[in-house]
Amino acid sequence: MATRPGPRERLLEAARELTYTQGVHVGVDAILKQADVARRSLYQHFDGKDGLIAEVLRSSGNEARYRQVMDEAGDDPRQRVLAVFDELEKITTRPSFRGCRHTAAGLAFADPGHPAHAQVRAYKDTLHQLFTAELTRHGHPEPRLGADQLLVLIDGTLAHAVTRPDAHPAMAARMMAELILDSRPRGSA
């Protein structure tokens, strides 16, 4: 017989699902109802909804998924980066796709001091480091700039797929990623 997860885990799971499907402004009562916990548990474990949202973002595990996709693609940095766009094509064409939870949270909270913003920045910085490392291994002339460019493509793919999934933005972005990967030093022929 499986034991039921505790209130903290139930709150996180309910918040992960509801903030993704309904947005970060979903009501606390809906989260509490789905988690089947008392309001007191929310404050005991997360100091309120803002803390819960920040923890959902911190513990999303999305960066681990990027690493997994890259690792499954082998050791060639070029193929590892392109595999991300192949995976994004699969993800963004699912009927349940609602965009990037981190970007959505960053856009939803106007207050730059909201704890979600620190988690969004940390997540994006982690992805930047991941792509910088791959581009360095690949011998890219400007790996940090290339990583910035890849992140623009990924963010654009995730946003565009929400409004135009049939356009297959991940495949268009993959072609642009190939251009980034094939970059030569500035001034070379």
Image: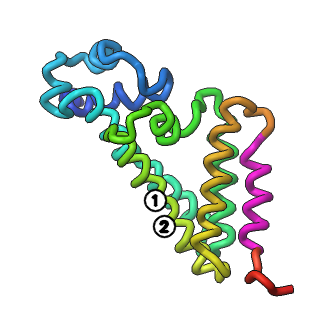
* Residue at 53 percent of width and 56 percent of height: 66
Residue 74: x percent and y percent?
Answer: 60, 70
Q: Disc number at residue 70? A: none
Q: Is residue 25 above or below residue 5?
A: above
Q: Mostly what secondary structure, the magenta segment?
A: helix
Quarter of the rendering containing residue 94: top right
The answer to whether residue 121 is left or right of residue 94 is left
CA neighbours of label 1 inside 10 A, class few (<14), some (14 to 19), many (20+): few
Q: Is residue 183 above or below residue 112?
A: below
CA neighbours of label 2 inside 10 A, class few (<14), some (14 to 19), many (20+): some
User: What distance separates the C-alpha of mark 2 from that of mark 1?
Assistant: 6 Å
Amino acid under disc 1: Asp
Number of numbered callouts drawn: 2
Camera-side residue of 181 and 185: 185
Amino acid under disc 2: Gln
The answer to whether residue 32 is left or right of residue 136 is left
Residue 140: x percent and y percent?
Answer: 66, 79
Q: Is residue 62 above or below residue 175?
A: above
Residue at the limit of the structure toward the right, as seen here: 189
- Does 177 lie within the magenta span? yes
Q: Is residue 3 visible?
A: no
* Residue at 47 percent of width and 41 percent of height: 102
Q: Which residue is mark 2?
A: 129
Q: Secondary structure at mark 1?
A: helix
Do labels 2 and 1 touch, CB within 8 Å? yes
- In the rendered image, the quadrant that contains the C terminus is bottom right
- Does 133 lie within the magenta span? no
Instruction: State which region is magenta.
Output: 168-182
* Residue at 28 percent of width and 27 percent of height: 49
The answer to whether residue 115 is left or right of residue 134 is left
Q: Which residue is mark 1?
A: 125
